């Protein structure tokens, strides 16, 4: 695992920060990229590559927070009042009746010193005005990593005759007491299946799905 500490120099304009910053953590450019490394009836190995993160300063009630996003990722929507973090969802086909088990094979990371990650706020109904900012003050002084997992099996489902597993990759971990984040530049994940089946590649249109799903059929 590779850790590189990068300090961000913020420029003040009056009493607030302006502009957004792009921080390179991996190679290349653009959005988070998911690729299949190996695939068979026993499991799937995939990799997620993160070129960098976007940091946008946000002023609320005289306090400046940092919104950190990753192009191609979506909001995790975890706990209101705690740091807002992104996820990269990966949707895989699986053998019928199998129980997926996940393990991380390798991971490269970089550490960025960023103060006060913006806290997740409650979802608003159409036309509803936002209320006062909600923040878990005690959590922001805790010496923890959030979220604690880098990748999880979120759930399994069946789409007509296609059994799938939804894997969520958390490429960004917040350490609130240290005022830093750790960003994954590349992570390789293995999802093992128990059931025996023959898999073939199938393209399925989905804005947040892996680039090329596997359709599962019985041999």
Image (cartoon, rainbow, N blue to C red):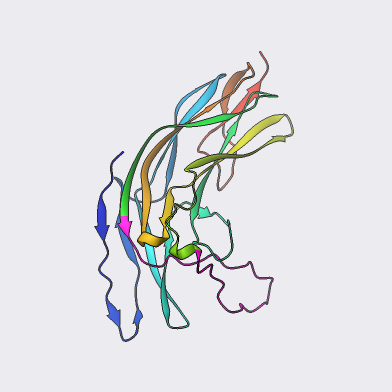
Judge whether residue 121 can be spotted in this image: yes
In the picture, residue 99 is in which quadrant? top right
Q: Which of the 4 image quadrants contains residue 16?
A: bottom left
- State which quarter of the image contains the N terminus: top left
Measuring 58% from the left and 56% from the top, which residue is drawn there? 78
| Quarter location, residue 19 | bottom left
Q: Residue at x 74, y 33 (%)?
A: 160
Q: Position of residue 17 (x, y in %)?
A: 34, 77
Residue 51 within the magenta-colored segment of the rendering: no
Whether residue 70 is visible here, answered yes or no, is no
Q: Is residue 175 above or below residue 201?
A: below
124 falls in the magenta region: yes
* Residue occupying the far bottom of the picture: 14
Residue 48 % position (x, y) = 42, 40
The magenta segment is 112-138
- State the residue in front, 187 or 112: 112
């Amino acid at each position: 695992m590779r850790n590189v500490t990068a300090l961000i120099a913020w420029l003040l304009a009056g009493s607030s920060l302006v502009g957004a910053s792009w921080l390179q953590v991996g190679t290349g450019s653009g959005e988070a990229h998911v690729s299949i490394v190996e695939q068979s009836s026993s499991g799937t190995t995939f990799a997620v590559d993160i070129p960098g993160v976007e940091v946008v300063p946000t002023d609320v009630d005289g306090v400046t927070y940092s919104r950190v996003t990753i192009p191609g990722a979506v909001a995790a929507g975890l706990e209101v009042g705690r740091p807002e973090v992104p996820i990269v969802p990966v949707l895989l086909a699986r053998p019928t009746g199998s129980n997926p088990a996940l393990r991380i094979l390798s991971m490269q990371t970089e550490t960025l010193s960023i103060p006060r990650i913006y806290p997740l706020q409650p979802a608003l109904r159409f036309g509803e005005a936002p209320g006062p900012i909600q923040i878990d003050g005690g959590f922001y002084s805790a010496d923890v990593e959030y979220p604690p997992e880098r990748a999880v099996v979120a759930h399994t489902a069946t789409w007509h005759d296609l059994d799938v597993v939804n894997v969520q990759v958390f490429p960004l971990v917040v350490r609130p007491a240290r005022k830093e984040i750790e960003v994954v530049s590349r992570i390789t994940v293995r999802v093992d299946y128990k059931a025996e089946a023959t898999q073939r590649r199938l393209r399925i249109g989905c804005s947040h799905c892996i680039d090329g799903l596997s359709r599962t059929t019985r041999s």
